[in-house]
Each structure stands twice: as C-alpha cells, then as structure tokens.
Amino acid sequence: MTILAPSVLGADFTKLGEQVEAIDRAGAQYIHLDVMDGEFVPSISFGMPVIKALRTLTNRVFDVHMMVMNPDRYIDAMKDAGADILCVHQEACLHLDRTLHRIHEAGMQAAVALNPATPVEALSCILQEADMVLIMSVNPGFGGQKFIPYALDKIRAVRKMIADRGLSTRVEVDGGVNLGNVGDVIRAGADTIVAGSAVFRGDPADNVTAFLEKFREAQG
Ligand code: DX5
Ligand code: ZN
C-alpha cells in the first residue's frame, strides 16, 4: 500500500494543529516532521516541543526526518516526544550501524536518508538494519524545491537492492513531489510519499484526497 506522509514544514504554522487534524481526517497515514539543526542543513525548523504538542492531536504515525548532525544525541528525546519512525541521514552519522541499533533499542522504527549526491550503494552493508530508506529528491533544508529527476534512478536501484535480498524495507521519497510527478515516483518503486507544498498549498484535506486517489490510479 502506498502511504502519504505530508510534511508539516509546508503547513501554515499559525494553524498548525488545525491543519494536522485536517490531514489526519482526510486519510494521510503518516505525519512527516522535518527537524533541522542549522548545521547539517542551513535552516532551523522545530524540535521536540512542537512534536510533543502535535502528538496530543493525532494517532497517525510520526515520521521524524532528522536533518541534524550526530542525531544520536536526540534518540531518546524524540521517542519521548512521540516519534514512531526516526530517520537519520547516512551523511550525518559516523557510526550508522550503532545509530540504527540505538533507534531500535529505543522502540522506534529506523530509517536512513540519502542526499541526492549519495549513491544508494552507501547502504549496501546496512540495508537489512533499516526499516525504511528515504531517497531525497531535493537537497534537504527547504520546502518548495524542484524534484531532481535522477532521484527516479536511485529509487529503482534501491528497490532492486531490496528485492534482490528478499527484504521488505519501505522506500520513501522526499522533495518536490506533486500530483503531476507522483505517478512516476510510485512506478519507480517508492511506497511512501512525502509532500509538503503540494499538500499544504491550497486546501490540505482536498490535496490529501487527491494524492490518495492518484495512489489508487498508479497502483492500477
Ligand atoms: C526538505 C524536507 C522536505 C520538505 C518537502 O528538506 O525534508 O520534507 O518539507 O517539501 P516539498 O514537498 O515542498 O518539497
Ligand atoms: Zn523531510
């Protein structure tokens, strides 16, 4: 099943709670939460207090994308704040194997994100330790950027690695996904779709409905 993970970075922060409740009601299965530290990426977004507050509004899966150097520092705090999936960047972890084990020990699913320039082969040794791989289709740090086309080749390549090894790892795609290109993204092998501006520009609930309809079409 294809999962929609709206990125609340695209939300109107003056109506954050309302909009999260609206996308939950409309059927978005995950809530994608982008945490930025001003070091791994240029910008700073939000952290544990905001995630904890949103946790009181919805039971949907919290998919926390850590655009943070050395994210090990926050594993327990993110669990306490209500994260279900903790996604760390391969480029931000010196000891990725240990980080993934710590995330599992804390009781969360572990995901690994790759920047556009990082080849999928960087996951070759660690793939079986991850519950989900996140292929970035923009350079992380900001919402509203344009989809990088070669990300489709990376989705196909990682999907093949997963199939060849008989794994059931999810493949998530993040950055510049919209109603126009999501069909290609799904056909390339993605099963978890992050969308920020394409969900929150206009009416978030209507946009969620439109994405879920596209998912049904793309799956035939
Ligand atoms: C980018 C973030 C994304 C972003 C997606 O650094 O990781 O999750 O919010 O936003 P759109 O869909 O607008 O590219
Ligand atoms: Zn993200």
Image (tube, grey):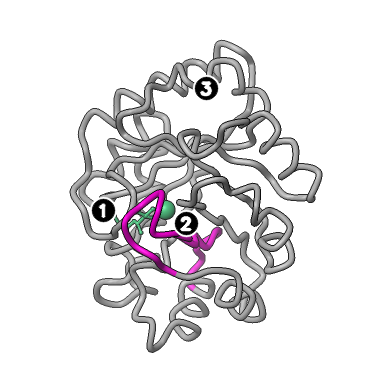
Three-letter amino acid code at disc 3? Leu
Give the labeled residue for mark 3: 123
Q: Residue at image x 65%, y 47%?
A: 72
| Neighbour tally class for label 3: few under 14, some 14-19, many 20 plus, Cα within 10 Å | many
Three-letter amino acid code at disc 1? Asn
Q: Quadrant of the N terminus?
A: top right
Which of the two labelled residues, at mark 2 and mark 1, occupies the earlier sequence position?
A: 2
Residue 178, label in figure: 1
Q: Residue at image x 31%, y 34%?
A: 116
For the residues carrying marks 3 and 2, which lies nearer the camera in this image?
A: 3
Q: Position of residue 110 (x, y in %)?
A: 65, 41
Label 1 residue near ligand 1, CB within 8 Å: yes
Question: What secondary structure is found at the residue carrying circle 2?
Answer: strand
**What distance separates the C-alpha of mark 3 from that of mark 1?**
27 Å
User: Main SS of the magenta segment?
Assistant: loop
Span of residues in magenta: 26-45
Q: Position of residue 87 (x, y in %)?
A: 56, 46
Task: In this rendered view, identify the residue nearer to me: 159 or 107.
Answer: 107
Give the labeled residue for mark 2: 5
Task: In this rendered view, identify the residue nearer to me: 203 or 214.
Answer: 203
Q: Position of residue 197 (x, y in %)?
A: 28, 64
